[in-house]
Amino acid sequence: MLANIRQHSFMVARVAKTLVQGLVRSCATPPDLHEVVAGALLHDIAKTQCLRNNGHHAREGQLICETLGYPHLGEIVLEHVVLKNFNEKLYLQGIFCAKELVYYADKRVRHDEVVSLDERLAYIIERYGDGSAEKETLIRHNFDATLNLEQLLFHHLDFTPDLLSQNLADDFQTDC
C-alpha cells in the first residue's frame, strides 16, 4: 500500500472511531468499534494495485477480505464508495452499521486531512470525474446521499459536522 493511502486510511479510522464514540455518548446503537476501525483501515486495501491495473478497488478489496476469511469486512470495503442500502428509518433511530460510518468517514477525508463534504466532492469530481458529465452526475448523486446520511448521523451526535476535526478520537491504536 502506498504511504499516502495508508495515511488516508489511518485518518478515516480516526474519524470513524470518533463517530462511534459520539454514538455511544448519545445512547444510540453504534456498531462494534473494532469492526468499524478494521473496516476503515482496510477500506482502500486494493487501491494501490488498482491504480496500476485500472481495477475497481472496492470490489477487489472485498475479494481480498473474503479470500482471507473476512467476508463481513469485505462488505464494508465494497460499500465504502457507494452504499447499497440507505435505511433512513434505522438512522432516525440512531442505528448505524459499520459500513455507513466507514463510508461517511471516507467522504470526509481528503488524503490525510478532514475536510467538508463540499471540499471532498470537488476533489473527487476533479480526480475521478474524467471531465465526463455522466460521471460527475453519478458522483453528485452519491454525495446527495452522503449529505442526507450526515444530517441523520449528526442528529445523534453531540457535535456538528464542521466540528468533526476538533473532536477527533485519539489514535485508534490506543484501545483497538
Image (tube, grey):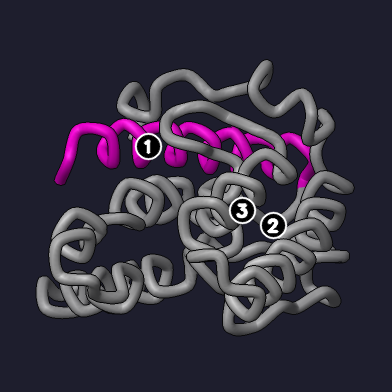
Identify which residue is drawn at 35% across, 70% down.
58
21 in magenta: yes
Q: Earlier in the sequence, mark 2 or mark 3?
A: 2
Kind of element beneath mark 1: helix
Q: Nearer the viewer, mark 1 or mark 2?
A: 1
Query: Between 52 and 25, which is closer to the camera in this rendering?
Result: 52
Circle 3 is placed at which residue position?
104
Q: Amino acid at mark 1?
A: His
Q: Is residue 100 above or below residue 172?
A: below
Q: From which residue to which does the magenta span run?
A: 1-27
Identify which residue is drawn at 19% across, 54% down.
48
Q: Residues within 10 Å of mark 2 (few under 14, many from 20)?
A: some
Identify which residue is drawn at 53% across, 38% down.
109
Image check: 84 left or right of 151? left
Task: Specify the quadrant that holds the C terminus.
Answer: top left
Kind of element beneath mark 2: loop
Circle 1 is placed at which residue position?
8
Circle 2 is placed at which residue position?
29
